[in-house]
Amino acid sequence: DAKLAADGSNPSLSSYQRKKYVWKLVYIHVLGYEVDFGHAEVLALVRSKKYNEKSVGYVALSLLLRGSDPVMVTIVSAMKKDLTMAPATSGKKKKGVIKNDAVQCLALCSLANISGLELIQAMHVEVQHVLVSKTSTEQVKKKSALCLLRLTRTSPNLLSGREFAPHIGQLLQDKHLGVLTSLMSLLNGLASQHAVDYESLIPHVVHILSLLVMKKQCAREYLYYRTPSPWLQIKLLKFLQLYPNAVEGHDIGMEASGYVSQLINV
């Protein structure tokens, strides 16, 4: 019999064999059968330094394990390490080197899918740091905003609105419409639970809406039948609908105030 490593995985397996066996476990799960074995091999792939192994590990982790599983305690440190990877400073790409933002996205997607109160408590601070970090890429910011939304739905009192609102205000100044769309999904989820804490963000939201509708400032890839990012517009208006009587009380300009009030009342 082969000797097992400290984490229970079989060190005699090659990279190809371990990935193949884990994909077979995923297939068994997809067929509807319960898979309560082979978890050690999944964790071994997640801890790997190779992206092709790590990606397989995170997919299997999201499908086969839940946050309440005892084995998840052993993987928290690896997920934190992947989530908080320092951004690459060199522009040169080396063969075999993992792109940091790709690994961060893997960890964020898995965390959102697995959830679980204990895992949320252990990881939510790192997710917030990644979201507000100036070094995070647009892709990571989008994933982290949606991941944090998922975590707050499971644990509604996870964030202090009064402390977190200024960070969102800074993020709402981002020029990337994809980041803004994901961020507005998070903001709508938070404001629907604690509307008063996020009322100070109304001017930021109105400013973005006026840029889209009045000035037509929109990247070409976000135009839909000549309409600037309609999905973002809907999210912006959905947020403003939470404050039907508050828009007039903010210094957003007479023209913008009348326009927004008209749209909200439609």
Image (tube, helix red, strand yellow):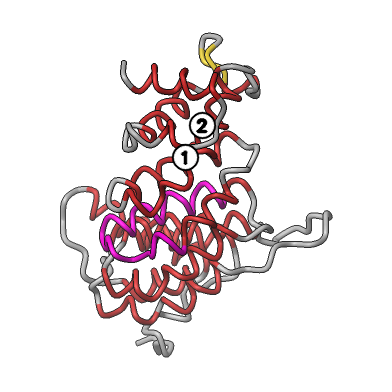
* Crowding at mark 2 (Cα within 10 Å: few <14, some 14-19, many 20+): many
Residue at point 36%, 63% (across, down): 61
Residues rendered magenta in the picture:
140-163
Mark 1, residue position:
202
Residue 151 shown in magenta: yes
* Kind of residue indicated by mark 2: Val
* Kind of residue indicated by mark 1: Ile
Q: Position of residue 66 (x, y in %)?
A: 26, 66
> 246 or 46: which is nearer to us?
246
Residue 64, relative to residue 183: is it above or below? below
> 10 or 152: which is nearer to us?
152
Q: Are marks 1 and 2 in contact (CB under 8 Å)?
A: yes
Residue at point 33%, 75% (across, down): 72
Left or right? Give the position of 145 relative to 88.
left
Left or right? Give the position of 86 relative to 10.
right
* Crowding at mark 1 (Cα within 10 Å: few <14, some 14-19, many 20+): many
Q: Secondary structure at mark 1?
A: helix
> 223 or 250: which is nearer to us?
250
Q: Position of residue 236 (x, y in %)?
A: 44, 32
Which quadrant is home to the N terminus? bottom left
Mark 1–mark 2 Cα distance, whole angstroms, equals 6 Å
Residue 228, relative to residue 36: is it above or below? above
Q: Position of residue 183 (x, y in %)?
A: 48, 44
* Figure quadrant of residue 217: top right
Residue 55, relative to residue 14: is it above or below? above
Mark 2, residue position:
206
Residue at point 49%, 54% (across, down): 144
